[in-house]
Structures are given as C-alpha cells and as structure tokens.
Amino acid sequence: MAERRTYEIVFIVNPDADDAEVMRLTEAVQKVITDQGGNVTKTEMMGRRQLAYEINHQRDGVYVLLEVDGSGAEIAELERRMRVNDRILRYMTIRVDEDRRRAEKLKGRRARKAERKSANKAKANKPATETEADSEAA
Amino acid sequence: MSTNYEEREGGYGREGGYGFEREYERAGMPGRGPRRMQRRKICRFCIDKVDQIDFKDVKLLSSYVPERGKILPRRISGMCAIHQRMLAEAIKRARNIALLPYAAD
C-alpha cells in the first residue's frame, strides 16, 4: 500500500466562475488531496478556452491541471467530490508514473544503442582493438 | 477496387492543416494498374525520438486529426505502430476533456 503513484488531474470549471471562484475550487481540491495523505506537486491554471464540444450547454471552460503524488485513495475521494460538484463540468485523472518510467526506459535503451554504435565505429576505424571491443560487447 | 481506395483517400479532404498533403496527393493519384509504388514513409516521432505524447499538446495532436475529427490512419501518416498507439491514446484522452472533438460537423 506504500506504493507512490503519480497522477495528472485535469478539471474544467464552469465558465461563469470568476477567478476567485476557480481559485477557491482549486484550493478545495488541493485540500482534499492533502487531507487524504496525497501530495500536490504541481498546479497549473491552463486558463479559459473553448471546448471542442458542448458540455452541459457550455461552450467554454476554465481548465486547471494538477499533478499529484499519492496512493490512489485520495483520487477516489476527489473523484467522488468532483462528481457531485456541479461547477466542475468535467474531470479526468490519468496515472502518469508508469508511462514516464517507460519513457525513461526507452531513453536509456537508445542511449546504450548509440554508445554501442559509436563503439562499433571505433572498432571499424581501428581493427587492432577489435578483440577488446568484442569482449566488451559480450 | 482501386476506385474505392481513391474515394476513401479523398474523403479526408485536402484542405486540412496537417502536413501530409504530399502523401495524400500521391495516394489519390488515379492508381491504374498495380503500379502504385510509393516511397515508404517513415515515422516522424521516431526521427524526433519522442518517448511520450502529451494529451495536452493540442497543437501537435490536431495535426493528426483531420476535419472530421477522426484519427489519421497509419497508412497515411506512415507512423510506426508504437507511436501510432501512443498518439491514439493521447487523442482519446484529449477528446475526453474536450480539447479535441469526438466528431466534427
């Protein structure tokens, strides 16, 4: 249960809300998370933008992005609260730690590949060190 | 059969802002006979060494979403399977939070 996961939460606030209300809602969300033992690592106001389709007869919305570290319990609680809050038009939570780890892995693999390539090139240039490079590759 | 193919390609429209007009034109040429050899397209994301596609990057994603709102198929963009899957996932996420349309018009 001690596993830490990273989540990205995006929610859309009703466009009638003024900046103060958006701030208030965001703080409420942050509070829910910290109360449940989570940790908010990033808060970004993405601002007001047009929705690609109407949600509850609204054409615009105020986007807020949060990045959260936690166990998953706070996400469950937060989603329950956002579901009943009618000022929040839409929310989405995405677990990002696995994707990021995979991206890191790909990066590492590519770096190793590049290394091997340059090593091979050195080998081609200097055939005398061939045995050395071979033993390295093995 | 070849006419069918042509119609399908034309259906995506040519006025879209995604950077695949050249491929479209080549694919849309009247393909009489089996001579429709074309250069194998290569994955742009592989060249740029992209490991992750962010669903919030609307500008990038919308270049793979023609007017109708569909996801640009791999046979047209020439993407590799890994990146096509990442892209599809990102587009679907963006749709969920109304950054991209599910269907346009």
Image: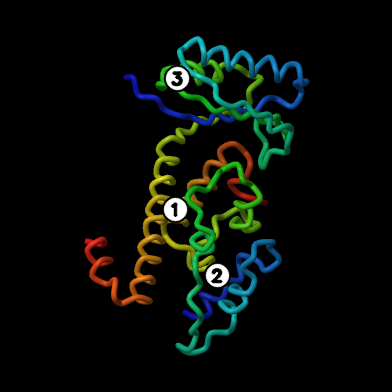
Mark 2 on the same chain as mark 1: yes
Q: Amino acid at mark 2?
A: Arg
Q: Amino acid at mark 1?
A: Arg
A128 sits to left or right of A110:
left
Q: Residues within 10 Å of mark 1 (few under 14, many from 20)?
A: some
Q: Residue most toward the front?
A: A128
The residue carrying mark 1 is B85
Tell me the distance, in whole angstroms, between the alpha carbons under discs 1 and 3: 28 Å
Front in this rendered view, residue A98 or A112: A112
Q: Are marks 1 and 3 in contact (CB under 8 Å)?
A: no
Which comes before the other along the chain, label 2 or label 1?
Answer: 2
Identify the residue shown where x is 44% and y is 62%.
Answer: B80
Q: Amino acid at mark 3?
A: Ala
Where is residue B41 shown, x and y percent of the image?
A: 51, 72
Where is residue A43 shown, x and y percent of the image?
A: 62, 26
Quadrant in the picture for the N terminus of chain A: top left
Circle 3 or circle 2, nearest the eye: 3
Circle 2 or circle 1, nearest the eye: 1
Identify the residue shown where x is 60% and y is 51%.
Answer: B61
Mark 1 on the same chain as mark 3: no
Q: Residues within 10 Å of mark 3 (few under 14, many from 20)?
A: few
Q: Residues within 10 Å of mark 2 (few under 14, many from 20)?
A: few
Tell me the distance, in whole angstroms, between the alpha carbons under discs 3 and 2: 44 Å
The residue carrying mark 2 is B8
Q: Are marks 2 and 1 in contact (CB under 8 Å)?
A: no
A96 versus B4 height, above or below: above
